[in-house]
Amino acid sequence: MDREPSKKIRDILKRDSKAILTTTRLPYVFMADKARGDFAYDVDGRKFIDFSSFIAVYNFGAGSIEDVKKAVKLQADKLMHTAFYDYYSELPVEFAENLLSMFPKGFGKTFFSNSGTEANEAALKFAKLFTKKQYNIAFYGAFHGRTHGSLGLTASKSKYRKMFGPFGNTIHALYPYCYRCPLGKEFPSCGVACADYVKDTIFARDMPADQIGAMFIEPIQGEGGYIVPPKEFMKKMRKIADENEILLVSDEVQAGYMRTGKFLAMENFGVEADIYSMAKALGGGLPFGATITRTSLGDIPKGSHASTFGGNLMAVAAANALIKYVKKNRASLEKVSKEKGAYARKRLEEMKERYELVGDVRGIGLMIAIELVKNKDTKEPAIEETEEIMKKCFSKGLLLMPTGISSIRIIPPLTITMENLEKGLNVLESAIKEISIRKR
Ligand SMILES: Cc1ncc(COP(=O)(O)O)c(C=O)c1O
């Protein structure tokens, strides 16, 4: 299949490079035109199976929930923007109630913004207000956003932070990346020794616990490489937080909203956080962030936080229609995510057996990644091969996104048919096979 960019695409690329500042882009050029369900189409009308959910946003297929589209169209005719943190409006309140109904008991307050990074900025400020403490703990490998406060928490790639410091009030702890243990140990014989770093090193050498207000954690590290911590680790973090009056903030921006089968990814660990941040899938394709707090934490002082577009009616209309769909279908979405995830994991584990390149397979539900290595013993990251595989898959009609240093995410919509899931995995395997043969 011809996947060389057409003249039309080349022309748009030229205009793009003139008018748009450089940010991040993939190793292949997908010039999006439209998407429906399992498929995405480029401006030349070429069709792709979507294994990216457009970066974990379309968790239920692009444009496939009719009620979301209907709600947005109706709202567009009525009122798009309501200055919600100045005026009042019923729809954001209804949405807040629906959202909170998906949370464990005791979660009763929300703040709405427009993105994941803003949801975390709000969490940073709220934690300071609630605890009167200035410092935070975050983890190496974490990604919490790119605005100044959240960038201080982010530590997945140094290039994200280069030139933007100083970031004075966050101290980074060790995340249990068991495939590449930062302490050179093995789970479970390690007894999750990395968890002790918080007490032994941070509290003892960096900053006493009584100065630390919040611990920001991704239940599964997203940009860090889809790293799944052992349950014991998360429970230890909860315990450390409890013992030291530190608020646990779960960043659910990527792992939340049913991606792992659970509404909150933290549910997989049997742990409750005190503050949750959400975005990506939450808005059903429109920009939306939310910060959700435990009722017992109380309220924030008037005027201490707000946002012009927070609670924007277009985004809220989409989010409210989507949460109603999720509420109604929660059990079946959990089931399909488990089943499809298990099938994908099995296929990927088989690939790990067959190909030297596939070093690790990990994930929960339909949040899965494979880590590619040049050699299973040395675990040298197969960076170029990762790019080549994604390019090859693109040329064969499959959209994939990278994560970590040399990993590929497998995050199709939860609603993907088994047929398309299998087709996509077949494409991925054929690309891994081709690259593996070439490397020999
Ligand atoms: C876990 C996590 N938190 C925060 C963010 C930042 O979200 P946004 O890009 O909407 O600001 C991301 C984005 O990928 C993320 O994965």
Image (tube, rainbow, N blue to C red):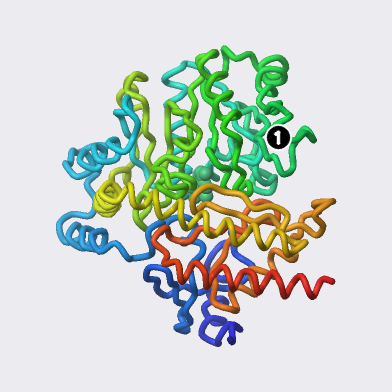
Horizontal side of 264 relative to 3 (left or right) equals: left
Res. 89 image quadrant: top left
The amino acid beneath tag 1 is Phe
Residue at 61% x, 84% y: name it.
Answer: 4
Q: Nearer the viewer, residue 301 or 287?
A: 287
Residue at 21% x, 58% y: name it.
Answer: 71
Residue at 67% x, 73% y: name it.
Answer: 431
Query: Which quarter of the rendering shows the N terminus?
Result: bottom right
Q: Is mark 1 within 8 Å of ligand 1?
A: no
Q: Measuring from the top left, give residue 376's x and y in whole percent.
A: 80, 54
Q: Say if residue 433 shows up in the picture.
A: yes
Total count of labels: 1
438 lies above or below 204: below
Say which residue label 1 marks: 187
Q: Measuring from the top left, give residue 18's x and y in whole percent.
A: 56, 71
**Local crowd size for mark 1, using a 10 Å CA cut-off: few (<14), some (14–19), many (≥20):** few
Res. 110 image quadrant: top left
Horizontal side of 77 relative to 431 (left or right) equals: left
Q: Say if residue 316 shows up in the picture.
A: no
Q: Measuring from the top left, give residue 48's x and y in whole percent.
A: 49, 75
Residue at 31% x, 38% y: name it.
Answer: 102
Q: Could you tell me which secondary element the residue under label 1 belongs to?
A: loop
Q: Measuring from the top left, give residue 133's x and y in whole percent.
A: 51, 17
